[in-house]
Image: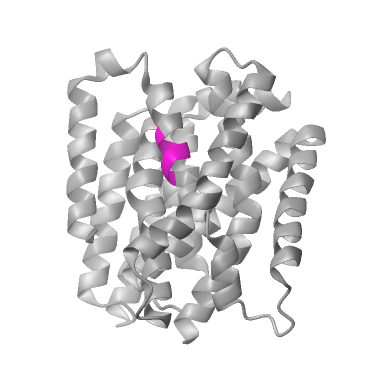
Amino acid sequence: MKIQQQIGFTLLFLTLYLIFQDQLIAHQYVICVVAILLFGIPHGAIDHILHKRFSKQKDRPTHRKFITWYVLSMVAYFVVWFFFPFKAFLLFIAMAIYHFGQEFAEELDIKLDSKLPILLWGSNILLMPLMLNYQDLSGFLLEVTRVQLPILNQESVSYAALLIPSVSVLYFTRKYFQHQLSKNIYLKILAYLAMWLVIYTLTPFIVGFTLYFVLHHSLNSMKHQYESLAKLSRQYSLKTYLKDVSGLTLVSYFGIAFLLLVSGVQTWEYLTLYALVFISVLTLPHMLVFDDFYKERDSA
């Protein structure tokens, strides 16, 4: 999907949400959680294949060792969630900021000798909206982690949140005038920043985040996977890619269904929490695999 199409579909879904907001508000958790799981899991379902084809490690582990490492890292992170939920949450935010920013830089082909554009973009997508919803975030963390955030005026925190896109605009503008960014990329960055600022201002966090996670991050990541694998082999088709993705995706769905039956979750708010923890434990090994994948892909 081209960038113009992504922006068009995003604005279309935003418009539909605003028109039918009263009808959707009671079901927004259902829709968002299902959408995140439907698209989030498949975009990480071939990490083992990416590792096999693109890992930079000289002593590349066997498939069995890689799966063992992948599962054990998830288990270890889950243990952190169990004993240190606040620290686990902060780690998840840091990982997601980097991972989202890296995917965005790859999609727009931003080549700068710094991690700052990656961190800035990830902060616009995750940190800024969390700050715009500081009161809700405080209540969520208190319930989940038993940690009380400082009591701050929401209006003041919202103004502070706007520093993130402001700094981003200044940074990318400086890089443009230093001829380190093309005009095309620079204008796309500004368009994206403006769009997501509007979206996060007009919608609840869960809605805005779902729009980004599904229509941009997940689809972009899957496109990067397929294009890179197809480049290695002319026989690698879209049908082959979908077949590769479907295996672990179905296993994950059955696993989630089993865990839900065992846990007896009765509200979508708590299901959102379970989805957050599940996605976060997947994010740790997934982010490390993708970091290796993007570095190897760029150096090829």
Structure colour scheme: one colour
Residue 37 showing in the rendered view: yes
Mostly what secondary structure, the magenta segment? helix
Image-based side of 283 in relation to 166, left or right:
right
Q: Residue at x 40, y 53 (%)?
A: 217
The quarter of the displayed image where residue 180 is located? bottom left
Give whichever of 193, 109 is nearer the camera.
109
Q: Is residue 206 visible?
A: no
x and y percentages locating residue 278 in the rendered image: 62, 38
Question: What is the span of residues highlighted in magenta in the rendered image?
Answer: 35-39
* Quadrant in which the N terminus is drawn: bottom left
> Height in image: 233 above or below 3?
below
Q: Looking at the picture, how far across and down is residue 26, in whole percent?
A: 36, 13
Q: Nearer the viewer, residue 251 or 197?
A: 251
Above or below, 129 against 47 in this view is above
**Front residue of this view, candidates 255 and 189:** 255
Image position, residue 185 (x, y; %): 26, 70
| Above-or-below relation of 157 to 242 | above
Residue 79 lies in what quarter of the image? top right
Number of callouts in the render?
0
* Residue at horizontal 47 percent and vertical 59 percent from the top: 244
Say which residue appears at 71% left-offset and 78% top-offset: 60
Image-based side of 250 in relation to 59, left or right: left
Location of residue 35 by image quarter? top left
Q: Position of residue 242 (x, y in %)?
A: 39, 57
272 inside magenta stretch: no
Q: Residue at x 37, y 17 (%)?
A: 27
